[in-house]
Image (cartoon, helix red, strand yellow):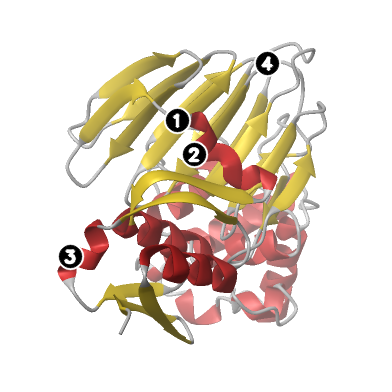
Amino acid sequence: MIPDAAHIKQLFIKHANGTCTAAETAELLNYLQEEGSEEMLPMPDEIAGGMSGMLPMGNVAAERVLHNILGTGATPEVKRGKSVRLRWIGIAAAAAALVGAVVWLYRPGVKQPVLTAYSTVKGEVKHLLLPDGSRITLNGNTTLQYDSAGWQANKREVWINGEAFFNVAADAAGRFTVHAGSTTQVDVLGTRFNVLATSQQTQVVLNSGKVKVNISKGDNTKEEVVLVPGEMVAYQPDNNKLTQQMTDTLQLTSWKDGLHAFRETSLADIATMMTRQFGVKVSFAAAELATLQFTGTTPAGNLDVMLTILEKSLDLKIYKHGDQVVITKAK
């Protein structure tokens, strides 16, 4: 019997809302396993009510969702058909995230997580209060998620891409874990620290307390680092380089207080920060300009004022056109 497309769409909507019964879940699983049924898959915008901006989770995440349909962590022995089915599952899961809750497919007896997400646009700083009283400050172009349904003293977890400063509640019992990007896990208890997670590097700076940083390296090895106040650990996946050292915590975490503090910082490093936080592309009219060093403070959320301060302090002329910034010598 050929399934009705409207009925299948309703099953996906119910699943996204976490209201599928066991029988409906079994029906949905059977549908996904059928060969040649890709043409009947409802589009994600049908499920999300026409919402835009959906990004696929990728085959790895989609496989994980499919495993949860089956109710097991083991690799399922089922017919997959074409890879488009997996890609669609990932897109549908992302559609569910846009309506405020990403839920894993039905698993009997297991409470479904609800990922609550907070994000900032380029140049924005946002302050958050988590259920345990921990205070988080998000830098620009950052996303943080946590499981609001499963949040409890013995399992406090957040996921971050971008940069955030954490002030973990000291009187909240139990473990607090930060998943930074795809390589780093930070285990903390009653502490203040900064996490930067980008595709170029992951960096953890400890202001007070104690953290244990677990890093999955590109050579399939893992390394554990324990930080003391004033220390930083940084990992660059491109060259598999891991460094641990004492650092200037004021310079690396002052952004949370509305200022960027620089101490003999090269223009090349400042340009990298501007690209990350404001989304601009910075170029130098002469290579030696990138090596110039700046000491001082600038507003954290105002790119135009920052560029003006750099111009006057280093005798430069800086041109900004849209998302392009060109640094030249003053004439």
Give the amino acid at mark 4. Gly
Kindly indicate whether the residue at mark 2 contacts the one at mark 1 (C-beta within 8 angstroms). yes
For numbered disc 3, what is the local secondary structure? helix
Residue at the image point whose x is 70% and y is 15% from the top: 154
Q: Earlier in the sequence, mark 4 or mark 1?
A: 4
Quadrant showing the C terminus: bottom left
Q: Where does label 2 land, which residue?
A: 251
Q: Is residue 119 above or below residue 160?
A: below
Relative horizontal placement of residue 219, taking residue 305 as reference (left or right): left
* Residue 104 at least partly seen: no
Label 4 – label 1 distance at C-alpha: 21 Å
Q: Which mark is residue 288?
A: 3
Give the amino acid at mark 2. Gln
Q: Where does label 4 land, which residue?
A: 190
Label 3 – label 4 distance at C-alpha: 44 Å
* Numbered disc in front, either 4 or 2: 2
Q: Where does label 1 land, which residue?
A: 248
Query: x%, y% of residue 64?
Result: 48, 45
Label 1 – label 2 distance at C-alpha: 6 Å
Nearest the camera: 248 or 210?
A: 248
Residue at the image point whose x is 49% and y is 82% from the top: 39
Quadrant showing the N terminus: bottom right
Nearest the camera: 96 or 248?
A: 248
